[in-house]
Amino acid sequence: MDLNNDQLKLENQLCFPLYASAKEVVKRYKPYLDEIGLTYTQYLAMMVLWEHKTINVKKMGEYLYLDSGTLTPLLKRLESIELIERNRDPNDERNVIIKLTPKGEALKKPASQIPDKVKECLPITQEEIITLYHILYKLLGTK
């Protein structure tokens, strides 16, 4: 058995540049998210709510690829800073419904500037962004 196999080199792993690039992109978001008081994951959750206004926890988890164990503390924090409300579905007590508060809705305007600011500091062209977008969603099996 060849223990010096090239397939075990870090530089030959698809997962590593995906992981490292994702960290770098998220790092570019941080100063802009700090201005509006959100973490990156909170920002993702808020984007789902800005789009859907009201959603159940299970569906939000599907959109964000997060399980309820990760999502619940995130939602509790958003609720504690009065950006969302969480309530049991009166038709099915097992479901928790999340909805934006007026404060959460108001945050949409300053947040709407963030994607363009981040694009400006990425070292790739608009065409490369579109290509990368399609490749990544293909990997996720959704587009």
Image (cartoon, rainbow, N blue to C red):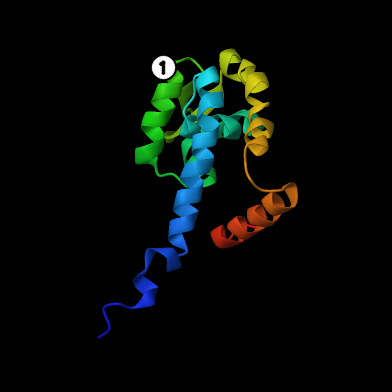
| Residue 16 figure quarter | bottom left
Q: Position of residue 102 (x, y in %)?
A: 60, 14
x 52%, y 25%: residue: 31
Q: In this view of the protein, which residue sits in the foreground, 126 or 52?
A: 126
- Report crowding for label 1: few under 14, some 14 to 19, many 20 or more residues within 10 A (C-alpha): few
Which quarter of the figure is the C terminus placed in? bottom right
Where does the image place residue 15, in percent across and percent down from the top left? Answer: 44, 60
134 sits to left or right of 3: right
Q: Please give the residue where the numbered disc 1 appears in the rendered image.
A: 80
Q: Locate the N terminus and report the quarter of the image it occupies.
A: bottom left
Residue 92 in view in this figure: no
Direction bottom: furthest residue: 1
Across and down, in percent, residue 140 comes to 55, 58
Nearest to the observer: residue 109 or residue 120? 120
Q: Which residue is drawn at 65% across and 52% down?
A: 133
Judge by depth and name the residue closer to the eye, 70 or 90.
70
Residue type highlighted by circle 1: Ser
What is the secondary structure assignment of the residue under circle 1? helix
* 33 left or right of 130 in image: left
Q: Is residue 41 visible?
A: yes
Q: Is residue 4 left or right of residue 108?
A: left
